Image (tube, rainbow, N blue to C red):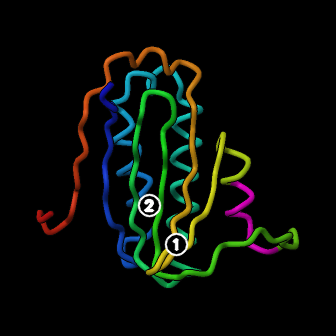
Amino acid sequence: MAVKAMGWAHSFPMSEGARAGREWTRERLKSLPWAAAEPDTVDSVVLAVSELITNAHIHAHSDAHLVLTWDGDCLHVSVHDEDPALPRQREPEPEEVSGRGVAIVRELADEWGMKCQRHGKTVTACFRPADADADADVSSDVSSDRPDGGS
């Protein structure tokens, strides 16, 4: 049985900020058959992407490499950065403006995890839309949207 999935990859330099990641993600999700019927799931994915890119930029001082993969059951959101230190959940004071990213991703995602790698780490969150069965015919399609047009 062939594995069928579709996905996208894009790097977000520190100079672009999380807004570019939110916009890029929202545009890619439009192609998924369940996205129009599940705006709350789309919003959750976009918010998680924003938090993960922000963490890569601010805490890891790194570009963020985002991969979205839809496998017919779960939309996997993976962000890689160059810092091998795993993020940790904090208990910020109410007046603090940061420190909630890990808690937000944990709350939004159906599953999530972190993996140290030789050159940094990857944080992955899984989102399972209720209407995933609407995507019965997923084709193999992985593309890269690099700003330089290369591969």
The magenta stretch is 96-104
Residue occupying image coordinates x 34% and y 35%: 5
Please identify the residue farthest to the front as the structure is shown: 1
Q: Taking 51 as reference, is 68 left or right?
A: left
Residue occupying the far left of the picture: 149
> Does the CB distance between marks 1 and 2 fall below 8 Å?
no
Residue 95 appears left or right of 105: right
Report the residue marked by disc 2: 19
- Indicate the quadrant where residue 92 lies: bottom right
Q: Position of residue 45 (x, y in %)?
A: 54, 44
Q: Residue at x 34, y 42 (%)?
A: 27
The relative height of residue 42 versus residue 1 in the rendered view (above or below) is below
For badge 1, the amino acid type reads Lys
Q: Mark 1 = which residue?
A: 121
Please tell me the numbered disc located at residue 14.
none
Answer few, some or many: residues within 10 Å of disc 1's Cα (few below 14, many 20 plus, some between 14 and 19): many
Is 102 colored magenta in this rendering? yes
- Indicate the position of residue 120 as horizontal and vertical percent values: 49, 78
The Cα atoms of the two marked residues, 1 and 2, are separated by: 22 Å
Q: Does the magenta segment cover residue 44? A: no
Q: Nearer the viewer, residue 137 or 42?
A: 137
Q: Quadrant of residue 29?
A: top left
The three-letter amino acid code for the residue at tag 2 is Arg
Return the x and y of residue 61 as percentages of the image width and height.
50, 85
Q: Residue at x 65, y 44 (%)?
A: 111
Q: Nearer the viewer, residue 115 or 148?
A: 115
* Left or right: 14 in relation to 141: right
- Earlier sequence position, callout 1 versus callout 2: 2
Residue 86: percent from left, percent from top: 64, 74
